[in-house]
Amino acid sequence: MAAKFFPESSQSFMATGITFADALSGSTIASKASGPVLLTRPNNTPDPIHSYLISRQPEKITIFGGTASVNENVIYKPGNWKVEKKSSFIQGYADKPSYQPGDKVDLYISSEYGYGAEIYRMGYYEGKGAELKKSFGYLPAYNQSNKKRNAANSDANWVKNVYFSIPEDWESGMYLIKLVDSRLNASYIPIVVNAKENNGIGIVIATNTYQAYNNWGGKSFYGYNSTNNEPAIRLSYHRPYQEGNGSGQFFKYEYNLIRWLEKKGYSLNYYSNVDIASGKLDTDNPKLLIISGHDEYWTKETRDSIEKLTKSSMNLANFSANVGYWQVRLEDDAETIVSYKAKADQDPYQKILPGKVTTQFRSDPVNRPENQLFGSMYRGIPDKTYPMVITNSSHWIYQGTGLKDGDEIAGVIGGEIDRYDGEIPQVELISSSPVNLYGKKSVADVVWWEKPYGTKVFSVGTFYWNWFLDPYGHEAVASFNRNIELITENALEELLK
């Protein structure tokens, strides 16, 4: 009745369905406000009521009788993109990591209770962090959690049970589909929307690395979080993410940079790793490609594409470390990632096509070290967080900062680090910060490189840089730093010339 008679209502009223007094006395108020009275249990919202709230997105919800009659914690407040109650009771994944406007998105969702979904585009949005683009419900409970996984690649083998089409007017971006059941359990399904046309700046979402660390179903490419300490060789994109409430590694590093870039007005075209491996970058040929986070796992096709473009017209901004370190392959129509890693000698491509063996890019038989792209490359994991030490303050990149050689910016260097060892000529050290790597003294380097082809590279060589542009989610260890912002702005201005 609420859906039929109040299709445009911006206000809803809640009352206990156990006794009639609150609903009866409040009905006059609801009538004057042209809003429905929705009946609920005091400590449990029925599935259809919960789904109605998600699909209608009322701006205001009033509880008759107050919290003595209905516990407000069981009423879903629509329009909040954050997951506040993560649970394995509701999970899902999309059929692909990325799409374009007009594409159909198939979703595979498992839920023990009725649920709804909200789709948010992530960004700054005046500090709100996201914008609601679409919502839908009612979706009945459909539990797929006990289905037998594919032992070869950890594919969840779920049935697709929801779909929608991406509107033509949706802009490129990182979108999170928030699933919320009637018990307020929630999780995300991440998708990238890639624009049909190039707009000058591309930004990478590291979906291969998300899956490499994802141990849903018991397996990742790492022994430490895999069953029997035995890493997988094949991993499917068709499974939920364990990290980030289902968002993968998005909130670790990428979201911070995206919030800052969009706050500053940069217009971005978003690419998943699969987009780049399939040749989308070659078609678009952006002026600048931004690596926004921990983008460790690349295919040969990805390396070929980026290397070719940076030898002609495309500049690079690497806002992380340990990028393009492991070579992987995409198989099964890009639904499966293959990585032998420490077992690279068992990779059948050793005999078929040595250049596609899934080992480190710098190692035999691939022999394509990362510093050929970035000037510096991955060297290790420091024993703690270190300050960034200014060592070349006369460089134009420090314009406006007032920084001097020896000045420090606390907390910037950590996680993993890159270093420049002089192998590549013409690379300029912007900062060289002392660290300890595995009991030995070393340095973490920020570099600028004007390549002989006329293209340029800026690489920060640390995981934590982005937190000092926008510290969302990392406020305990980082805060906004105007000097980091100025360095970043100066670098981007030069890269976009």
Image (tube, grey):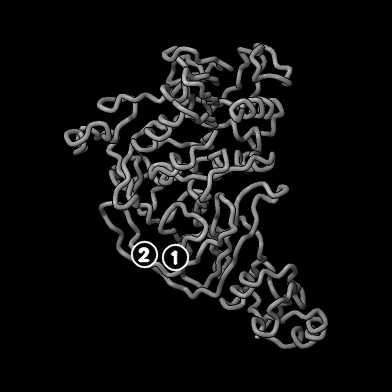
Q: From the viewer's side, name the closer residue of 464 and 118.
A: 118
Q: From the viewer's side, name the closer residue of 153 and 208.
A: 208
Estimate the x, y position of residue 149 in percent, counting from the top left: 31, 59
Earlier in the chain: of badge 2 and badge 1, it is 1
Residue type, numbered disc 2 = Trp
* Residue named by callout 1: 109
Q: Quadrant of residue 180?
A: bottom right
Q: Residues within 10 Å of mark 1 (few under 14, many from 20)?
A: many
* Residue named by callout 2: 158
Q: Which mark is residue 59?
A: none
Question: Separation of disc 2 and disc 1 at Cα?
Answer: 8 Å
Q: How many marks?
A: 2
Q: Residue at x 59, y 30 (%)?
A: 465
Q: Would residue 419 appear left or right of 486 to someone viewing this image?
A: left
Residue 229 visible = no
Badge 2 marks a residue whose secondary structure is loop
Q: Are marks 2 and 1 in contact (CB under 8 Å)?
A: yes
Please determine whether, in this image, residue 469 is positioned above or below residue 247: above
On the rendered image, what quadrant is the C terminus found in?
top right
Please determine whether, in this image, residue 320 is positioned above or below residue 89: above
Q: Residues within 10 Å of mark 2 (few under 14, many from 20)?
A: many
Q: From the viewer's side, name the closer residue of 120 and 101.
A: 101
Badge 1 marks a residue whose secondary structure is strand
Estimate the x, y position of residue 285 in percent, counting from the top left: 49, 37
Residue 349 visible = yes
Estimate the x, y position of residue 393 in percent, counting from the top left: 65, 13
